[in-house]
Amino acid sequence: MLLQTIQMTQKHTNKELLSKGIKYMAFTLPLLFLCPYLITLSFLNKDNFSFYIFLFLGIIVFILVIYLFYKGIKTILDSMFK
């Protein structure tokens, strides 16, 4: 009887929420490599107007990476512990 009660109160991972968090992380991975490339490309073109374009894009991608990484980790942890 005690074993049944323990098994019924045990929580399980929400698989839909876990897959959503993994999708966030999978989308973040290529952006992690794109961001430093764009910033480096901007500093290599200091003489041209493209310096500002690539620097702006690099900073935007950097902010997007931080947001998506936070959202992915939070979603994965919510799927396990809620």
Image (tube, rainbow, N blue to C red):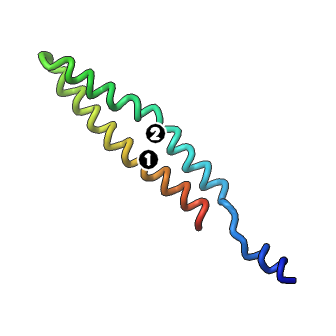
Residue occupying image coordinates x 73% and y 76%: 9
- Residue that lies at the very extreme toward the bottom in this rendered image: 1
Q: Name the residue under label 1.
A: 69
- Alpha-carbon span between mark 1 and mark 2: 6 Å
Residue extending farthest right: 1
Secondary structure found at label 2: helix
Q: Which mark is residue 53?
A: none
Q: Specify whether 56 is left or right of 23.
A: left
Above or below residue 78? Residue 71 is above
The answer to which quarter of the image holds residue 10 is bottom right
Identity of the residue drawn at 36% across and 42% down: 64
Position above or below: 43 against 60:
above
Give the answer, above or below, for where 4 lies relative to 79: below
Q: Position of residue 12 (x, y in %)?
A: 69, 64
Question: SS for tag 1?
Answer: helix
Is the Cβ of the residue at disc 1 closer than 8 Å to that at disc 2?
A: yes
Please state the horizontal and vertical placement of residue 49, each as a whole percent of the image. Answer: 15, 20
Q: Which residue lies furthest to the front in this view?
A: 2
Residue nearer the viewer, 4 or 16: 4
Which residue type carries mark 2? Thr
Q: Name the residue under label 2.
A: 28
Q: Is tag 1's residue or tag 2's residue first in the polypeptide sequence?
A: 2
